[in-house]
Image (cartoon, rainbow, N blue to C red):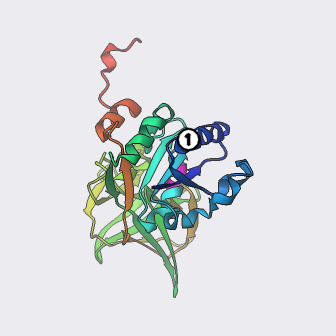
Amino acid sequence: MKIGIVGNTSKPKAVTIINRFCEILQQRGVDYVFAENLYRFLSLRQKDIVIPIDQLGDFCSVVVAFGGDGTILSTAREVGASGVPILGVNIGTLGFLAEVIVDELEATVDNLMADQFEIIDRMVLRVDVSKDYLTKTFYALNDVVVKGLGSRLLYIDAKVNDTFLNSYRGDGLIVATPTGSTAYSLSAGGPLVVPNLHSFIITPICPHSITVRPILLSMDSAIELTIRKEGEPAQVNIDGQNRYKLLFHERLNVTRASYSIKWISIGKRDFYEILRTKLNWGANHNNMQR
């Protein structure tokens, strides 16, 4: 086994934790390589095992990402298509996508070495932005969000498999995966969806009509979004990290990507426990002090 290590270098404690992780790997005789963004934090001895992050999947059998949800999302986009399994270690605040905490590093390495883990396929969005004969393609694990750049209503026409779905009027529209159902979509009133249920979630953001509600679509759906009203450009956010301006009559096509993210679950916390502990889901507020 060889482990690829990715980390959020904006968090000072990340370097200390990653060094501790490397010590554990060395004690157990496990090989490892670093993503190149960690280069300036490494010792001279370690700098000969640095790999560009988008090539990690070619050099290791597991990628461990240290950080918050943003680090895990960016890691998934960089290495997910290679099929290498990804494990998230939370050193952020909420860290909803990361199952492992820092205190569990030693036990986690033992689990990995003994093949005591489950791999879950998580659906990925393919997002094609088309204008005239040009197309830009992005990939998202969480969601793609279309929002207006100003304070006026945004008009978005939506089709599913070439069939008209709705003309949305409001602040914008979210197309999310089940993984992204606990992110922006949830804040906008979308449903909670278990990660292994492959489907699309379309959630309107502050719709003009209260009768316009979120909808779930099958994983083989092809969604087409178009800005209908001229003079009101929109911004497309891919996993909250990549941004692209969408102009009048430009098309945004969302389909299921040809690959899934291989997600490692050690089995320490299932999806429902994470909902209860990190989202305070189902808490009995009557027993809380006022």
Task: State which quadrant residue 228 falls in.
Answer: bottom left
> What residue is pinned by disc 1?
21
Task: State which quadrant residue 246 falls in.
Answer: bottom right
Q: Measured from the top left, where is residue 103 in percent x and y?
A: 49, 31
Front residue (pair 29, 90): 29
- Residue 219 sits inside the magenta stretch: no
> Does residue 51 appear left or right of residue 76 in this picture?
right
> Does residue 135 appear left or right of residue 287 in this picture?
right
Instruction: Mark yes or no: residue 99 visible.
Output: no
Q: Measured from the top left, where is residue 225 in percent x and y?
A: 41, 70
> Does residue 14 appear left or right of residue 255 in this picture?
right
Q: Residue at x 45, y 68 (%)?
A: 82
| Residue furthest bottom as drawn | 133
Image: 150 above or below 221: above
Image: 162 above or below 37: below
| Residue furthest top as drawn | 289
| Quarter in which the N terminus is drawn | bottom left
Instruction: Mark yes or no: residue 166 visible.
Output: yes
For mark 1, give the secondary structure.
helix
Q: Residues within 10 Å of mark 1 (few under 14, many from 20)?
A: some
The region drawn magenta spans: 70-74
